[in-house]
Amino acid sequence: MVASRRSFLKGLIACGSLAVLPALAQNSQAQGKRVLILYFSHSGHTATIASMIHDRIGGDLVEIKTKTPYTSDYDVLTQQAKEEQRLKVRPELASPLPNPQAYDIVFLGYPNWWNTMPMVLFTVLEQYDFSGRQLVPFCTHGGSHLGSSVEDIKKLCPKAQVLTGFSAFGTKVRDAGENVDAWLAELKLLSQ
């Protein structure tokens, strides 16, 4: 007798084999669609969420890096980020990114800096064409959630379809798996 997928997954949960669950939970709606997970992460929090998304639905996982790396000194970083925003700086990318036109769905991850995305995300959204793509924002934060980042993405990419975003408190990302699952299921990219 062949067990159903649901029975198999319940069995994995019962025996404590949750580590393989995300890879097995890929939804057929996400399969067949070309997925790009682009993210910028300074402290590793956003990278953690990006990896969770990748584990669950697959696709290409690409980190956005600046040509000049940001400092690890938090106080200096916050002032630099604030000044970049005030001056509308567009930090240079360390290397080219994949062409978004080669994908159907593009997840876009970042930390919330001063109520929006870091300015390097503005660089990306201005340099690359996201027209006709489904853009899915996700961010990590210290209390501001998505801030005004979704509105900024919509302004920069008026010809993209911006789907419901996700935010996770930075220091709690390791416990965000169930919330990531629920969000992806809401977007119909993951079965529950």
Image (spheres, rainbow, N blue to C red):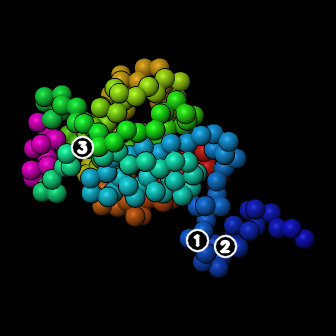
- Say few, some or many: other residues with alpha carbon within 10 Å of mark 2 (under 14 / 14 to 19 / 20 or more): some
Q: Amino acid at mark 2?
A: Leu
Residue tagged 1: 18
In magenta stretch: residue 78: yes
Q: Residue 89's spot in the image, x, y percent?
A: 18, 31
> Which quadrant of the view contains residue 34?
top right
Q: Amino acid at mark 3?
A: Lys
The stretch in magenta equals 75-83
Indicate the quadrant containing the C terminus: top left, top right, bottom left or bottom right. bottom right
Side of 83 relative to 103 (left or right):
left
Side of 27 relative to 89 (left or right):
right
Q: Amino acid at mark 1?
A: Leu
Element type where label 2 sits in the image: helix
- Labels 3, 2: front one: 3
Magenta segment, principal secondary structure? helix
Q: Earlier in the sequence, mark 3 or mark 2?
A: 2
Q: Residue 172's spot in the image, x, y percent?
A: 34, 61
Residue tagged 3: 67
Q: Nearer the viewer, residue 77 or 147?
A: 77
Residue tagged 2: 12
> Which quadrant of the view contains residue 175?
bottom left
Q: Residue 144's spot in the image, x, y percent?
A: 27, 44
Side of 1 relative to 125 (left or right):
right
